[in-house]
Image: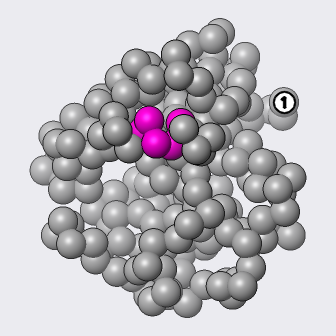
Amino acid sequence: MNSSTPQNCQFRLAEQSDLPSVMTIYDLTRAAILATGSDQWSATYPSLELVKNDLKHKQLYVATINHQIVGVTATSDIQLAYYRQIQWLTDDYSRHLIIYRLAIHPDYRRQQIGSFLLRQLEQLAIARQYDSIRFNVYSRNPNAMLFYEKNGYQRMKGNFQLPRHSAISHCFEKILK
């Protein structure tokens, strides 16, 4: 644990018994997003079915403090087809860990939990011999873009627009080696 690690914060693969807490964090995050008028997450995204699929494939991770789940994120090594439009730092023959749906419980925001999750995912990716971490961020979420940039991720040239969104998404990448 380094000096910027939240006290008593742990990182682990999610378990079936975590689903209610994970969905609560996603529900609270969705409500906050929708309250801003953003269409980043719909009323049904992320769905319980989607999160169960992440869990089934061992791609769902949680941050805990004193055994309470305070943050969640999903990962994959499958990139969105839209990513082909982006000018990445690494080529498509490299191995990339993709981050999806990083969310922090509202009571624990601004306490370095998100940065802690990113550092843990970076260590996980290095251990699994990935070359970089990639993800996309909705352009109407400037706080998220600033957060990722402060954590050493670079915004890529190019963007794309998902069919259900009214604005574009920007992509970010961090080389791990």
Q: Examine the rendered structure and indicate whether residue 155 appears above or below residue 15.
A: below
Residue 23, picture quadrant: top left
Q: Examine the rendered structure and indicate whether residue 34 appears above or below residue 28.
A: below
Image quarter hosting the N terminus: top right
Q: Secondary structure at mark 1?
A: loop
Residue under the image location 21 percent in, 42 percent down: 44
Predominant SS along the magenta part: helix
Q: Position of residue 78 (x, y in %)?
A: 56, 66
Give the residue at mark 1: 1
Q: Residue furthest top?
A: 66
Is residue 159 visible from the viewing direction of this image?
yes
Q: Which residues are magenta?
A: 51-55
Q: Examine the rendered structure and indicate whether residue 32 appears above or below residue 153.
A: above
Image quarter hosting the C terminus: bottom right
Q: Residues within 10 Å of mark 1 (few under 14, many from 20)?
A: few
Q: How many marks?
A: 1
Left/right placement of residue 158 relative to residue 93 reads: left
Q: Position of residue 172 (x, y in %)?
A: 55, 70
Q: Position of residue 4 (x, y in %)?
A: 74, 35
Residue under the image location 33 percent in, 34 percent down: 48
Residue under the image location 60 percent in, 36 percent down: 61
- Observer-nearest of 5 and 30: 30
- Observer-nearest of 121 and 58: 58
Left/right placement of residue 77 relative to residue 131 reads: left
Is residue 29 visible from the viewing direction of this image?
no
Query: Which amino acid type corresponds to the residue marked 1 in the rendered image?
Result: Met
Q: Position of residue 77 (x, y in %)?
A: 62, 63
Residue under the image location 34 percent in, 64 percent down: 138
Residue 107, picture quadrant: top left
- Observer-nearest of 131 and 146: 131
